[in-house]
Amino acid sequence: MLGSLGILLNPFLVEYAFEARAYMFFAFLIVTTTLFYLKKKRLLSSLFLTMAILTHNFAIFFLIAFIAAWLYDNKERLWEKKAKFISSFLLPILAFIGWLKFSWNQWIKVAEGFWIEPKTSSIFVDAFRVFFQGSLDYPSRAMLYNLSLILVFMGLSYWLVKIATGRGSNFLKKDNASLVFLFSIPFLIVYIISSFWVPIYHERYLIPILPLFIIWIIYSLLRLSKINTSLSYLIFAFSLAYILFAVQGGEEIMRKTTKPAINYGVNQILSQSQPGDVIIPESNLNFLETKYYVKKSGKDIPVFAYSPSGKIIFYLGSILFEKSDIVSSYPENKRIWIIKPDGGYYLKGED
């Protein structure tokens, strides 16, 4: 029960539980695929993995991880089990092939330039920090992070002791090995691509590995607690403390507003605008949102995206920008209202 609460109340998962994007659905599909894979329900695991591939490009890395786990689990008499492999992975592989042209075009565009900055090996530490304390600033994040460190270290110590004493063969038993493959292989692939080709690493793109990693740590802590009673009491105490701080952290996260108040800025501009005025967001990232709120208001005031080249970067949703929406220079003889990314605003020339 405490383990289930540990996943439910994880601050990073709480943050994205309220995002109207596909990241949590992606995580749900991968975790459900894992459940059916471990229960050897091949058809169901195949269907959910296929849906994951059609949901997010990073699902291909999890497909690779599932195939690697299957090959490891079935390394003995591998050829004789080819029918099981086909029933488990034919559908997701076909889905990937059918989606390949679209995915490849996206990867090529990413290689030409993307908003994610280059990463170093520090992403291993950074990922752990973000995954267990979230990306927002809230009062209890430090304590929650420290408790996470303690519990993860305790879980890892079980396997380190087993390996050090020569009893680590259990580490690569089927279910345990599968979980390790599923949360480590996608992360390592993304790290290698980000280091040697183009930066694509972002924690939210790898959000499915977080519940899988937590499940593995819970499993490790359960094994550790069986060694002696004192350890089980200690693990329970730290787990309970984590849950209590996670509840507090969840409340603090949910009180925070992560969405810039673009609607506020638009409403303020509309209340002061005059005939002939135009609105231009400071960042083209806010153009579609600004245009939506203006249209919703019913007011007839043009909204433009400013780009000296006349082009919009693809990852801003350039396909949704009409040619008439883009200006390469600021309109002359007009009052120009600028919307700032934080929801602020000002009249150009009077700032």
Image (cartoon, rainbow, N blue to C red):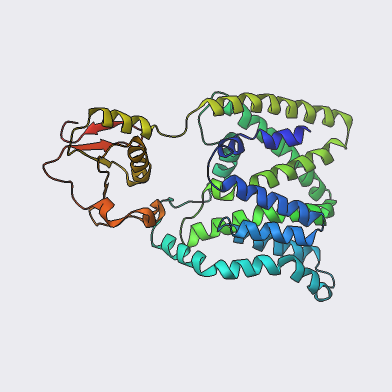
- Nearer the observer, 314 or 132: 314
- Can you give x and y, in whole percent of width and height, for residue 162 in the image? 82, 47
Give the image quarter of residue 282.
top left
**Is residue 199 left or right of 336 when viewed as pictured?**
right
Residue 178 visible, this orientation: yes
Locate residue 226 relative to residue 14 in the image: left or right.
right
| Percent position of residue 42, x then y | 78, 61
Residue 156 pos. (x, y %): 73, 43
Is residue 298 depicted above or below 246 in this figure?
A: below
Q: Where the C terminus falls, by quadrant?
A: top left
Residue at left offset 60%, top offset 61% = 60
Image vertical order of residue 94 relative to residue 274, above or below? below
In which quadrant will I find the N terminus?
A: top right
> What percent of the width, then of the height, locates residue 187?
60, 53
Out of 308 and 193, give the one closest to the viewer: 308
Q: Residue furthest bottom?
A: 79
Quarter holding residue 133: top right
At 46% across and 55% down in the image, what residue appears?
A: 199
The image quarter containing residue 311 is: bottom left
Q: Residue at x 48, y 51 (%)?
A: 119
Residue nearer the viewer, 75 or 307: 307
